[in-house]
Image (cartoon, grey):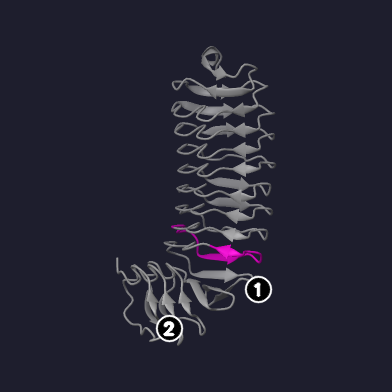
Amino acid sequence: MITEEMNDFVYNEDGTVLYSVPKDVVGEITLPAGVLELGDDAFRGCSQLTKVTLPEGLTRVGVLCFEGCRSLKTVKLPKSLRFIGEFAFMGCSFLKNIELPRRLKFLGQGAFEDCISLESIAVPGTVAAVSPWCFHGCAALRFVELSEGIKALGDHAFRQCRNIKIIILPESLKVIGGWSFCECDGLKEIVIPPNVEKIGSCPFAFAKNLRSIIVDSENKNFVSVDGALYVKDMHRLICCPIGYEGEFVVADGVKHIGSGAFLNCIGVTSIKFPDGLESIGNYAFEGCRNLKSMEIPDSVNDIGERAFRRE
C-alpha cells in the first residue's frame, strides 16, 4: 500500500470521489474505505501501477479510468460495484483475470478492449448488454461465461478474440450485434439461442475455422440449413460459415443474399442460386478467391457494392 504518495491523490471535499492520482505512481495501491467513485481518467496512464484493491462501498469506475495502465496485473473489484465506464480498462495489457461483481449493472463500450493477456471473464446476468467493442482485441481470452439475463451483444463485442473455442450464449439473449465474433478463429460451431430476434451484419466474419451455425429449434426468427444461417421465412440468407468448403447450394425460396454473407469464404468453389433470387448484398462474395462457377438468375435486379471483389 502506498502512503506518502497518496497525499497527492485528488479527492472531492468529503473524500468520496477520487478524481486523479500522480501518473508516476508505482506498485500496489489499496484505496481507503469511504471512496464511492473513481472519476473519469483517475488512473489513466499510470504505466507502473501493478495492483489495485478497491474498497467495499465503491459503486462506479469512471470512463478511461485505468486506460493505458499497461503494468496492471491485478484489480480487486468490490461487490458493491455497479458501473464500469467506457474504455475503463482499455490497454491493460498485463491484466490476466478480473472478477466482475454479481450485481454489476453496466459494462461500458470498450471496457476491456485490447486487454491482450485477459484469459477468462464471467459477465453476470445483471448486465443487460455486453456493450460494443467491450472485449475487442482480447487475444488470449479463452473462457467466457455469459449468464442468463444478458439480452444483447453489441457490435464488435468479441472481435479478434482469437482463442475463444466455445461460447455458450444465454437463452435470454435477444440481439447479436454486427461483427460481434469477427476474427474469432477458435470457434468451430456456435448455437443461436431460442429468443434471439435480431442479428447484425457479418456477425462471424473472418472466423476462419467456423464450420457450422446452429439455431435452436424453438427460435421463431432464424433457422439453420446445412450449417448456414437464414431468416425463418427462408427469404434471406444471412451468412455462410467461413469454414464451409466445396459447392454451396442456396436454399429454395431465398430472395436476398445478405451483406457479407460469404465474405472471405475461401473454401467455397461454386454457388447454386435458386430461381426467384432478387438481390445480392454489399461485399456478399468478397474475398471468395476460389469461387469458380455460379449462374446468376435473370430475376436478380440489385447487386451491391464489392459483391464479387476477389481480394
Q: Which quadrant does the C terminus fall into?
A: bottom left
Front residue (pair 131, 269)? 131
Q: CA distance from mark 2 to mark 1?
A: 25 Å
Q: Horizontal and vertical percent for residue 122?
A: 62, 47
SS assignment at label 2? loop
- Per the rendered image, the range of residues in magenta is 183-199
Which residue is identified by label 1?
Answer: 217
SS assignment at label 1? loop
Residue 186 is inside the magenta segment: yes
Q: Quadrant of residue 33?
A: top right
Front residue (pair 112, 307)? 307
Q: Quadrant of residue 274?
A: bottom left
Q: Horizontal and vertical percent for residue 154?
A: 54, 53
Q: Horizontal and vertical percent for residue 163?
A: 48, 53
What number is the disc on residue 147? none
Which residue is identified by label 2?
Answer: 273
Q: Horizontal and vertical percent for residue 21?
A: 51, 21
What is the three-letter code of the residue carrying label 1? Ser
Q: With 155 as the anchor, is 30 left or right in this view?
A: right
Residue at (42, 77) in percent of width and height: 279
Report crowding for label 2: few under 14, some 14 to 19, many 20 or more residues within 10 A (C-alpha): some
